Image (cartoon, helix red, strand yellow):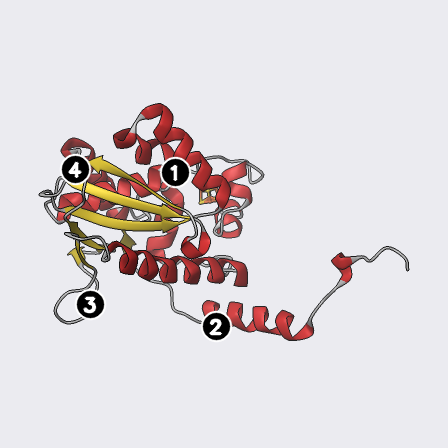
Amino acid sequence: MGNLDFTVYSDPTLEEMHKQVAVRAASEPPRRYLGASSVGHSCERFVWYGIQGAPCEPMSAQGVYAVTDGHRTEDLIAERLRLVPGVTLETVDANGNQYGFEDGLFKGHCDGFIIGLLQAPKTPHIWEHKACNEKKFAKFESIRSKAGEKATLQQWDFTYYVQAQIYMHYFEMTQHYLTVSTPGGRSITSARTNYDKGFALAQVAKANRLLEAQEPPPRISNNPTWFECKWCKFRAVCHETA
Ligand code: SF4
């Protein structure tokens, strides 16, 4: 028997499923507001294109699967956290809606509010969960071991850090509890973060400036092969316009 070449294997059913998942995702209308999860992106022009609903590369099926896994893992971790004696975790309000804030066209929805953490039993925290791949998970653990718990989020993922500060700001809370897991929730870790009022206010000001901007902000790079541009969903509209 010769060597098997698995790279040529293709299941037409699954190929079609991926295609249909991507088509369905592409048919969803773009949101026309600025979300707390976007404002910390490294490129202001990217954030601005998002507000404008500019044409972009549609999400791949793999991207859709990652987002779906993230939402399902979030529910799973919430269920597990509620098993801890003394922990109260609220993820929806009395109407069954996610907790959100709205400041004009600047909006956000947090994963929940938690109280009764064994390491800080009396302090209410914003709760967020992020599912990430094993490499990013290991990076989180490495940063926390070197920089300490409270500095971890900022160094691990600046966009998530901005999101955390904005939630603490709008929900008037001083602590944030982030749980992080590998896909499916097989490994899980955490870090708490303190509110930084000056930083949060600066991010709110940035959000308002981008919402009011009539022209696209400068590119993060004028080179379309720059690593952040290479994979950017707005690459075509961004680099093909003056
Ligand atoms: S292509 Fe580059 S400069 Fe343009 S929006 Fe994306 S990241 Fe920013």
Q: Is mark 4 within 8 Å of ligand 1?
A: no
The earlier-in-sequence mark between 1 and 3 is 1
Using the rendered view, name the quadrant where residue 96 is placed. bottom left
User: Label 4, label 2: how many angstroms apart (C-alpha)?
Assistant: 37 Å
Q: Amino acid at mark 4?
A: Leu
Work out whether residue 44 or residue 5 is closer to the camera in this orientation and state it: 5
Distance from the alpha carbon under mark 1 to that under mark 3: 30 Å
User: For the residue carrying disc 2, how many other residues have a C-alpha within 10 Å: few (<14), some (14-19), or many (20+)?
Assistant: few
Q: Earlier in the sequence, mark 3 or mark 2?
A: 2
Depth check, mark 4 against mark 3: the one in front is 3
42 or 223: nearer the viewer: 42
Mark number displayed over residue 97: 3
> Dot 1 corresponds to which residue?
42
* Residue drawn at the location 17% of the way across and 52% of the way down: 87
Q: Amino acid at mark 1?
A: Ser
Q: CA distance from mark 2 to mark 1?
A: 28 Å
Tell me where residue 15 appears, x and y as whole percent: 64, 70
Residue 59 visible in the displayed image:
yes
Gap between marks 4 and 3, in whole Å?
26 Å
Q: Residues within 10 Å of mark 1 (few under 14, many from 20)?
A: few
Residue placed under numbered mark 4 in the picture: 201
